[in-house]
Structure formats: C-alpha cells, structure tokens
Image (cartoon, rainbow, N blue to C red):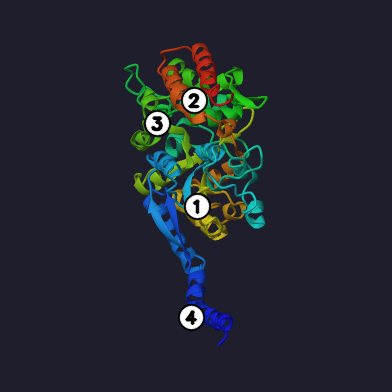
Amino acid sequence: MNPSKKSALLSAALLVTLAPSVSAQASAPVKLRFVSLAWQTQAIAAVKTAVAGCNAQSKSYQVDYQQVSWDSIQDYLTTSFEAKNVPDVFHYESTPVMEFGMRGYLTDLSKMVPAEMKKDVARGAWDTVTADNGNIYGVPFLWESLITLYNKDLFKAAGIRVPTVAKPWSWAEFQQASKKLTIDKNGDGTPDQYGSAFGLRAPTNRILNLALGFGGNYFYKSGNKYVVKVGDKEKALLKILMDMHYAERSASPDGLTAQSPELFAGFFSGKFAMLPGIGVWARQTIAESGPKNFNWGVLPPIKATSQAQGSATQTLSIPAASAHKKEAMQFINCLTNRTNDGKLAAGDWLFPTRTSSLKGSYFQSADNGWKVASESAKYLTMAPFQEVNGFTEVKSKVLTPIFQQLLANRITLDDAAKQIEQQGNEVLAKYYK
C-alpha cells in the first residue's frame, strides 16, 4: 500500500475513534462557581431554589453554589482578583463593583445583556452599574429604599395624621410629629417616649442617600474628576438631625450609637414611635419576630425639595478572568428572569429591579407594608458617590468618622463641613491625577 495512502487511512480511523470522545467533551456542561451573599434563611432558600432550577434546565453549564458573608466579600474578591482564582459569577453591590470595574477586574456586559432584560430593569438601576464610557459591570437585580416604620397605636393616641403616598410629610411636618410624640410621662426631665430613633452608628450611606432629597450631592463633577463640596443643600439634613437630637430632643440619643436592628426592642415596647430612614428589609424583623399584637405600618418617603433617594443596587458580575463568560451570562439571565427576580427580592424583603416583577401582587399587597414600601421604589436613583473612584476610602477615612463626631456633638456643623471638604479632596487627589 502506498505509504501516503496508508497514513491517510490511519488518520481517518483515528478521527473516527476519537470522534465520540470529542463530541462528548464539547457537549459536557461547564462548571460555574457562583458566590452568593444571601444571608437570611428565607433569602438563602430562594437563591438555592433558583440556582437548582437554572441547573435543571441548562445543558451548557452547571453551577456550584458558594456562600460568602457581606463582612468578608471585599477582602475575598480583592484576593481572588489578584490571584486570578475567581468565581465565574459573584453577588455584591454596585458601588464597590464600579470601582472593581474601573480597575479592570470585571467583564463589560454591555454587549451581553439581552434586550428584554435591558428594557425591563429600571433605568435608575442600570445607572448604578454603568460607567461614563457605557461599560456595564454588573446586572442589578435587587435594591432597597429607606422608609419610616411607625407605631399606629401611638399615632392614634397623639392624634397624628398619617401621611399617604398622595400626601407625604415634609421634613418640617415630620419634625413636628416627632415632637408631639415625645412624652416625659413621669416628669423627670427625660422623655419616656421619643418620637423618633435613627440608627446612626454607621451613618454615611444613610446621610448621603437621604441628602439627595434636599439636592445635596456631596460629590460633584469638575472636569474629568470629582470633588467634595458641603454646602447648604448638604447641611440641610445634618441640621435636622442635630436639631432633633440636641435642641428639640425628639430623637432618642440611643440611636446615635446603635445600628437599626438594635432599636427594635425600643420600637416594640413603645419607647420609639418611629424608626425613620431604616431599610425596607427591616419589615421582616417585625413580621417574624415582633410581638403578635404589635400594630405597625410604613410611611412614604419624607419630602424635602423632592422625595429622591440614592440607592446602591445588589448586583451580579462576571470577573474578567473567568474562563466561561458566555455561560456565566446565561446563568445570570436565568437567575434574574422575571419570576426569579421577584422571588429573590421577596426572600430578602427588598425590591426587584425588574419593573414587571415589582408590579406583581406580592409587592402590591397591603400586608406588611408592601404596597407603600413598593411605591417608594419610584424615587430611587443613583447617588453621585456611587461612581466616584476612591469613594470607599473617603467613606472610611473621612465621612464616617467626621459624621460620628458631629452627631456626638463634638464639632460644629460648619467645622464638619470644612473637614469633609479638605480631607475628602485630599483623598480623591490620589485617584484623580
């Protein structure tokens, strides 16, 4: 036999022998590692159920679920990016995600997002994950508003008009109601019942997000960089907080050193009539852990010049170092489809970013304040700080410690404003050269 012909036949036979193995390898689903930050029992169950459903219907991927805590995710991701040992999809929030994206660690999803998803997810939610150049560094799937929880029985006893979605309170009306609800029952000079209690141990996000209603941005674009400015619009909310705690004494001093969950005992006992500026998720604690006869409700956002609130979204992102970007995006599409997005939001007592999901009967029910809470979602927007490179450092080194000093009445409002501007811009100078 001709040597060349013999060689050709052997090659053909080898290809026939290998063909089934190659085909099987090509059709085998890829393994994806998904890092989730769900932490409440109901939320974890919702995520795991959705992941199992996506695995069951997919032939191109199978997802391994990995649990990481909110406390450790920043360090976990930083180490993963540097070592290039990354998950294929991870759950986080938009502000740090944008910083990671600008540092080149994340996949630009702008050409991977399906048209149906792009249209259905709220525009304000997309703004939180979209860079100035149009790059999208995550799919926003959950977000929350800051609401006011109130004790219906105390309102009735004091003859307080309950604000409605159609006729919300101004901040002046809120302050008046808080004063009326503050009562020194035994005459010892210290109120036994306070109108309000703000959880302000870690005050920065709450202050910056609520300040938008006054037109206070804190971070302003100047050419191709951001600068920190604290003017009258930024000072407005801070002045109200100081007045309520120190001049009017209608806000409990307990809130100055507490996180919001630590205030529930006082809320349940009637010590606090309102918990203003608390995350919408807090309703779960009342519904599941509060006294059975506790009569509570949700108030619409308080109006300054507007009812606007800043809100970072919870996101799903794909690292640039992932070897399976196509399949990872397929999984995200499944995990955040209209049905799943609603279930994931309900499990976390948050809002789905999909407008079609938010219209569902669950979110429009009067039960547990859902309808009033869901109405507040239309005021959510992206706060300027969410796209500031270096914000994380400004927050930890400047804003939080200075806000804490102000709220402890150790420095004046004007001093706080000057220090925030000076120190904040010194930090930002390192990021915008």
| Residue marked by disc 1 | 322
As rendered, which of 94 and 274 lies closer to the eye?
Answer: 94
Q: Are marks 2 and 4 in contact (CB under 8 Å)?
A: no
| Residue marked by disc 4 | 17
Query: Mark 3 is on which residue type?
Result: Phe
Q: Earlier in the sequence, mark 3 or mark 1?
A: 3
Q: Position of residue 314 (x, y in %)?
A: 51, 45
| Residue marked by disc 2 | 394
On residue 94, the disc is none
Q: In the displayed structure, would residue 61 be above or below residue 227?
A: below
Residue 45 appears in which quarter of the rendering? Answer: bottom left
Q: Earlier in the sequence, mark 3 or mark 2?
A: 3
Q: Is residue 114 left or right of residue 372?
A: right
Q: Position of residue 433 (x, y in %)?
A: 59, 23
Query: Mark 4 is on which residue type?
Result: Thr
Q: Circle 3 sits in a helix, a strand or a loop, which is it?
A: strand
Query: Mark 2 is on which residue type?
Result: Val
Given this view, does label 2 or label 4 mark the residue nearer the observer? 4
| Residue marked by disc 3 | 272
Q: How much space separates mark 3 and mark 1, taking CA atoms?
A: 49 Å
